[in-house]
Image (spheres, grey):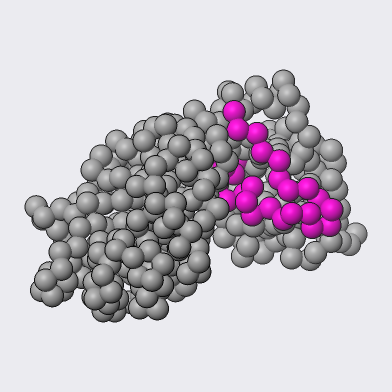
Amino acid sequence: MATARIIDFFNTRNPATPCLVVDLDVVADNFTKFRRALPLSKIFYAVKANPAPEILRLLADMGSSFDCASVAEIEMALEAGATPDRISYGNTIKKERDIAAAYAHGVTMYAVDCEAEVEKVARAAPATRVFCRILTDGEGAEWPLSRKFGCVPEMATDVLKHAVSLGLTAHGISFHVGSQMTTVDAWDLPLSHARTIFDAMAEAGVQLKMVNMGGGFPTRYLKDIPTAEAYGSAIFDALSKHFGNRMPETIIEPGRGMVGNAGVIKSEVVLISNKSANDNVRWVYLDIGKFGGLAETMDEAIRYEIKTPRDGADKTPCVLAGPTCDSADVLYEKNAYPMPVTLTIGDEIFIEGTGAYTTTYSAVAFNGFEPLKAYVI
Ligand SMILES: *Cc1c(COP(=O)(O)O)cnc(C)c1O
């Protein structure tokens, strides 16, 4: 959301558009809210949501750990001051030489979801800890993570037993309920699966220690979302229900929920047009689109809140599109976006809640447009 500091930055610096401004005070506040909502869980910030060095440094200073998806992200977390014991290599799809590079950096916790990945870790990072990711259905998530990551819960025991047979420590289970999860109860079912796997492993003589409950915590876009406390108490209740007084260590990996509401993108209206004389849907072209950082508008999944200088006026449905010469560069069309009838070419508009999954999704130079410029204040 546009904080006083962000508004002041736009007013005094008047940066060229498009650009993102991120307020670190909001990130700090989010971190504190997560820590209070789930005081027994360790926080591993999902670096991919926004890897700006200022954000990583702030979170490292506040005691956060880091969920990294690549060697480059591991190096960024180390650079920010995190020690290797505060880094998890959470991607289930890793090159063996990247696992070796992570191991050389001192990383000792790796995600796996199949036996082939376990074998890579056993060879390249011997005697470290692995956790097995299980599939979730993504139900209730606005940006589901599908079947790409994780195995069915029934397979996790085989994967973890294989790890033990190769000299690794079977550390625990992970899952991700799907990003922008607006249902606070979504953690209940995967936690019940985790408990079943803990029991099956105990029967085989292996005591698992950790449940990594992933990310999924939402940012407010157009609709209100439950508070961090509501997530915290629903998750705590589910943990108690399934684990009783034998609570495992737990981890959460917020990405979007840590930085989404800390950023605002300023953009400019480049063109407003109609497709025929009697067409009542206006096309509004902005100087940012799918290739400039708003990739999560894919399938119109994430619907950002947009503020304009003419918000008091009546609104009319508009197709919103980006500036590039690619027909895929349309943000909202199936579900047209209401914009003020008085909106004018050259107006500056503000796209709220854009601190997560924007800068890194922006193309290098498609059509000659520069990557999204970001200011972290
Ligand atoms: C992307 C990702 C996250 C962060 O997800 P959010 O929905 O942004 O909180 C957490 N864990 C893993 C393994 C991820 O890949």
Q: Residue furthest right?
A: 277
Q: Is residue 341 visible?
A: yes
Left or right: residue 206 versus residue 336 is left
Q: Is residue 24 above or below residue 180?
A: above
- Residue 148 lies, in percent from the top left, at 47, 72
Residue 318, percent across and down? 73, 53
Q: Residue at x 11, y 71 (%)?
A: 205
| Quarter of the rendering containing residue 340 | top right
Q: Residue at x 40, y 78 (%)?
A: 116
Name above or below for residue 348 compared with residue 206.
Answer: above
Q: If the image is split into quadrants, where does the C terminus sit? A: top right
- Please provide the residue range marked out in magenta: 352-377
- Pinpoint residue 18: horizontal percent, then vertical percent: 74, 41
Left/right placement of residue 87 relative to residue 69 reads left
In the rendered structure, the answer to whether residue 130 lies left or right of residue 282 reads left
**Image point (55%, 34%), residue name:** 54
- How many badges with numbers are in the image? 0
Q: Position of residue 86 (x, y in %)?
A: 36, 45
Instruction: Decide which of 290, 286 is in the foreground and name it.
Output: 290
